[in-house]
Amino acid sequence: MRGISFEIPNAYGKYLLELLDGLDITEWTWKIGDGESYVIQRDALGKPLFSNDCLLDGDELRRIISMDDYYLIFVDLKAFSKTSSVRDITTYQEFMESDCQFVILIVDCSYVTIYAKDQHIVQHLLLKAIANGYENIEYVTDENDGRTTLIAF
């Protein structure tokens, strides 16, 4: 089992906060890849939610995803332990050979794929997806994973 996939509503909200609720995201360093997500200001797209290709500590990520509603178009988040070396991860093989612990990819506002090395995290995220009423929830396995890269944009 590589991870899970599901669909979130194509709407603004705090979906990253919902997904990561119950995980201690402060224990990781987060690599933010190229993407496109915006803070909602006066019911319109405002400033970018993240700077592209940057690193955030877990406290800063929690602050960003907790403050305002946002609209997620393309998201590429990769979690590394704080003591590990952070590097670009573009394939599943690189993910497995790296210190990266899990990957969150969102494509076209709704399609979420999460890869995790820790099966407890996979189970936790699966239960969160079910509890939040997300659709088309399924495990990502060696047999059904059609992704060729682990990037969103």
Image (cartoon, grey):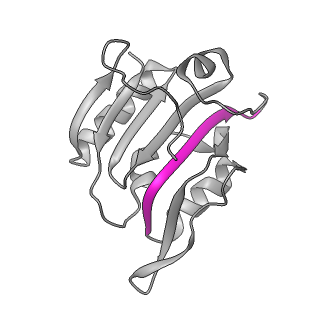
Please report the residue visible at 49 percent of the width from the left and 39 percent of the height from the top.
Answer: 104
Measured as percent of width and height from the top left, residue 81 is found at 69, 31
Name the image quarter holding residue 77.
top right
Q: Nearer the viewer, residue 132 or 147?
A: 147
Q: Quadrant of the N terminus?
A: top left
Measured as percent of width and height from the top left, residue 114 is found at 43, 34
Please report the residue visible at 32 percent of the width from the left and 12 percent of the height from the top.
Answer: 143
Please report the residue visible at 24 percent of the width from the left and 46 percent of the height from the top.
Answer: 134
Dominant secondary structure (helix, strand or loop) of the stretch shown in magenta: strand
Left or right of 152 on screen, residue 135: left
Q: Which stretch did the figure color magenta?
A: 70-82
In the rendered view, tell whether residue 109 sits above or below residue 137. below
Residue 28 in sight? yes
Name the image quarter holding residue 69.
bottom left
Name the image quarter holding residue 72.
bottom left
In the rendered view, tell whether residue 54 sits above or below residue 120. below
Residue 22 in sight? no
Left or right of 68 on screen, residue 137: left
For residue 96: magenta?
A: no
Q: Nearer the viewer, residue 136 or 13?
A: 136
Q: Nearer the viewer, residue 109 or 40?
A: 109
Q: Nearer the viewer, residue 78 or 23?
A: 78
Total numbered badges shown on the rendered structure: 0
Measured as percent of width and height from the top left, residue 16 is found at 45, 52
Measured as percent of width and height from the top left, residue 105 is found at 47, 41
For residue 75: magenta?
A: yes
